[in-house]
Amino acid sequence: MITVARTITVAVPRDRAFALVSEFGRAAEWDPGLAESRQETPGAPGPGTVFPIVADFRGKRTPMTYEITEWEPGARLVIEGAGEKATARDVITFADAPGGGTSITYSAALGMSGALKLAEPFLKGTFERMADDAVAGLADWLVREAGAG
């Protein structure tokens, strides 16, 4: 399993940042590693909400299904995903940042399935770059969305 973690600080109130990030069906709007994302479960996001996504990994589209498995409003969100080729567990924590805004720590544990498991040691650098791109996109998106709403 490969684990990558990043911490960003955004000029967005913690509760608003949590609410926006929990809309994981919109993740393709900020994560360039996703070709598609949507919310399947009706209503507001919460425990048990399901999000089908299509990851774009090295030019190949990989469908996965994510589900919110842990939910602490304003503080912590855990989303677990599974697909034919990979599993994932994303832990996202939110804290008030010194001087205002929100500090968000995004940790993703990714495991490959089947024969791809042998390639895991060689994919760490790729996942590190993907994490950099995803959190940069998340930071920009949060500021834009919070300003719009």
Image (spheres, grey):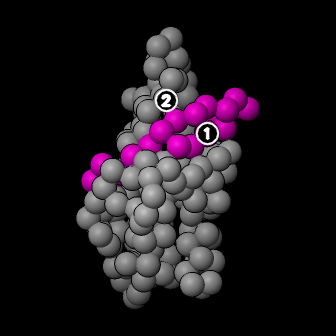
Badge 1 vs badge 2, beta-carbon distance below 8 Å: yes
Q: Mark 1: few, some, or many residues within 10 Å (few <14, many ≥20)? A: many
Q: Which residue is mark 2?
A: 83
Q: Mark 2: few, some, or many residues within 10 Å (few <14, many ≥20)? A: some
Tell me which amino acid carries mark 1: Ala
Q: Quadrant of the C terminus?
A: bottom right
Q: Residue at x 59, y 76 (%)?
A: 145
Q: In this picture, is 87 found above or below 104?
A: above
- Where residue 55 is drawn, which disc sits there? 1
* Foreground of the two, 105 or 90: 90
Residue 114 in percent (x, y) is at 47, 13
Q: Residue at x 39, y 46 (%)?
A: 67
Direction front: furthest residue: 42
Alpha-carbon span between mark 1 and mark 2? 10 Å
Element assignment for label 1: strand
Q: Residue at x 63, y 54 (%)?
A: 28
